[in-house]
Image (cartoon, rainbow, N blue to C red):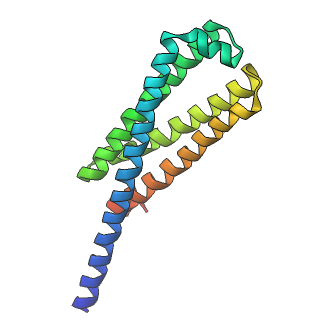
Amino acid sequence: MGALLKYIRKRLANAQLKARLLALVAFVVFAYLGVNDVLDLVKTITNPAQMAQQLGITIAENTTRAAILLVLSAVIALASLATALGAWQRTTLLRAWPVVAVTYVIYGVYQIAVALLQVRQPLIAATGVAYLLLAAAAFSFGRQASKALDPSAR
């Protein structure tokens, strides 16, 4: 009986490590993507005319769009870093993953709305769909890691 309990503990420890590593890698990638978005949007805000012309909207509309996306990207980057740190250190910072998932959903829905209602280019809505897929990934990886570190969360 003792050998069976030892085997089960060993398997659970491996499952925890695997979930933590997957969450760590995923949320570091999400943080990288968020920081990359922030940098791109800062460039857009500093030179709004070029992007406004490409999208066929006014400079004011483009600046507003970029500012909203900048705030959302900053939230994603910071919450992703916190989640990655929580996965690394086994702390409650891991619980920041819902912020990442929800912010990705908001970002995706906003991108789709802008593409369909303001820019009127359905092909651009594909970027919003990509962000919705990132939200699903953040949800999945965050939930797995939370369950692995906190068995009562099941």
Answer left or right for 93 relative to 100: left
Answer left or right for 70 relative to 32: right
Residue at left offset 68%, top offset 24%? 114
Task: Give the quarter of the image for residue 5.
Answer: bottom left
Seen from the viewer's position, the closer of residues 137 and 4 is 137
* Image coordinates for residue 76, horizontal then vertical, percent: 44, 34
Answer left or right for 136 relative to 10: right
Answer left or right for 128 relative to 96: right
- Quadrant for the C terminus, please: bottom left
- Quadrant for the N terminus, please: bottom left
Task: Give the quarter of the image for residue 4.
Answer: bottom left
Seen from the viewer's position, the closer of residues 141 and 91 is 141
Residue at left offset 63%, top offset 36%? 127
Residue at left offset 67%, top offset 8%? 58
Task: Give the quarter of the image for residue 115.
Answer: top right
Q: Is residue 81 above or below residue 52?
A: below
Seen from the viewer's position, the closer of residues 26 and 139 is 26
Number of on-image labels: 0
Residue 92 appears in the picture as rendered: no
Q: Is residue 105 above or below residue 16?
A: above
* Image coordinates for residue 64, horizontal then vertical, percent: 58, 13
* Image coordinates for residue 88, horizontal then vertical, percent: 27, 51
Residue at left offset 43%, top offset 52%? 142
Query: Residue reaching furthest bottom?
Result: 1
Residue 100 appears in the picture as rendered: yes
